[in-house]
């Protein structure tokens, strides 16, 4: 796939430090990386489908806007990433990089303060906010990628570990609710990790991938744009964890997975990721007692 050479790129030459394996301006002079830009729609779509109607109503009625912040953060990641891959400019790269931290920090705060009082929650917010401010300042001033990547992976790892603990603490052993939630968690972790490995392969095997795309030709060559698959996988995986954390921390009785979560979370809740178990949750009263003890 050769770059469009009939006209100069609309955005001018790239100024970003990061530039991925997709050939620049191969489809249009207005879009630097076509597939890497297009696949960001997954983030916005998952946000749109991911906020349950009752959650929007509750946020509007009671002012609990912080609860929907992670969902809007997911959409912001998609918009900032779109701006970066369309233009490949330094400032849009900063938007893309930092949006990842602005999206994960509210989720990290929510899961770390699941059992905390308001005072401890505020203290944790100040600590995480200070750490985020330092990271943003350092990243913008140095344009480095190591601390950015390590901190993002570390945040995601902590969220994953605490999510698994919450599943065990807030659902009854052997109940259908636990089995369904575990199905979604395992699926979210699997697809997120798949996206990460595709991201690595896209960087490590770029020469091979470009040769393969040249041999295959359009449109099937688009399938080998692995950074685009990273967007799809992480968009879905991030939504799954955001929704599961919201469900577990809120303490709401959301037994109807089909109505409470956006696809593919309902599918994951009854897939091989969920294992074998009862199809009807008979532990509703028991889980209500668990939530009562936790203060819900």
Image (cartoon, grey):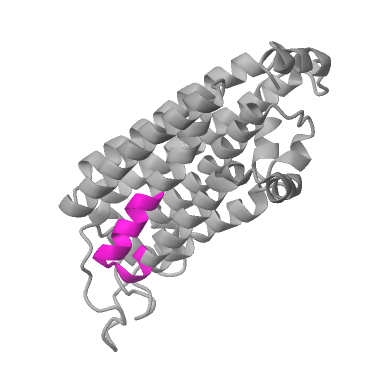
Which image quarter is the C terminus in?
top right
Taking the view exactly as shown, the residue that stands out farthest to the left is 142
Taking the view exactly as shown, the residue that stands out farthest to the front is 119
Which image quarter is the N terminus in?
bottom left
- Please tell me which residue lies in front, 194 or 149: 149
Magenta stretch: helix, strand or loop mostly = helix
Is 12 on the left-hand or right-hand side of 119?
Answer: left
Magenta span contains residue 87: yes
* Residue depicted at x 28% and y 81%: 9
- Please tell me which residue lies in front, 107 or 129: 129
Is 142 on the left-hand or right-hand side of 268?
Answer: left
Residue 135, can we see it? yes
* Residue depicted at x 36% and y 32%: 127
Q: Position of residue 192 (x, y in %)?
A: 46, 38
Q: Position of residue 64 (x, y in %)?
A: 64, 43
* Residue depicted at x 26% and y 85%: 8
Q: Position of residue 243 (x, y in %)?
A: 61, 38
Q: Locate residue 125: give its quadrant.
A: top left
- Please tell me which residue lies in front, 268 or 214: 268
Which region of the structure is painted magenta? 84-99
- Please tell me which residue lies in front, 227 or 224: 227
Residue 221, can we see it? no
Q: Locate residue 268: give its quadrant.
A: top right
Magenta span contains residue 142: no
Q: Position of residue 260 (x, y in %)?
A: 73, 40
């Amino acid at each position: 796939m050769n770059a469009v050479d009939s006209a100069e790129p609309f955005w001018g030459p790239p100024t970003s430090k990061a530039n991925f394996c997709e050939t620049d301006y191969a489809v249009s002079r207005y879009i630097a990386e076509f597939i890497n830009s297009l696949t960001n729609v997954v983030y916005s779509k998952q946000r749109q489908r991911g906020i349950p109607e009752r959650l929007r109503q509750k946020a509007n009625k009671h002012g609990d806007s912080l609860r929907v912040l992670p969902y809007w953060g997911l959409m912001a990641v998609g918009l900032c990433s779109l701006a970066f891959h369309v233009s490949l400019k330094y400032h849009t790269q900063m938007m893309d990089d930092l949006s990842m931290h602005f999206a994960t920090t509210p989720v990290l705060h929510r899961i770390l303060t699941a059992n905390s009082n308001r005072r401890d929650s505020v203290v944790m917010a100040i600590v995480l906010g200070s750490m985020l401010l330092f990271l943003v300042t350092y990243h913008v001033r140095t344009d480095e990628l190591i601390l950015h990547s390590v901190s993002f992976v570390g945040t995601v790892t902590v969220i994953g570990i605490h999510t698994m603990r919450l599943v065990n603490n807030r659902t009854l052993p052997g109940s259908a609710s636990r089995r369904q939630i575990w199905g979604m968690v395992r699926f979210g972790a699997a697809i997120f990790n798949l996206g990460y490995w595709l991201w690595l392969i896209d960087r490590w095997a770029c020469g091979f991938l470009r040769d393969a795309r040249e041999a295959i030709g359009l449109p099937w060559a688009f399938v080998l744009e692995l950074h685009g698959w990273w967007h799809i996988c992480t968009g879905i995986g991030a939504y799954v964890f955001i929704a599961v954390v919201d469900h577990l921390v809120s303490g709401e009785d959301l037994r109807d997975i089909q109505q409470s979560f956006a696809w593919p979370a309902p599918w994951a809740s009854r897939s091989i990721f969920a294992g074998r178990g009862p199809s009807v949750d008979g532990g509703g009263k028991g889980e209500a007692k668990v939530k009562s003890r936790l203060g819900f």
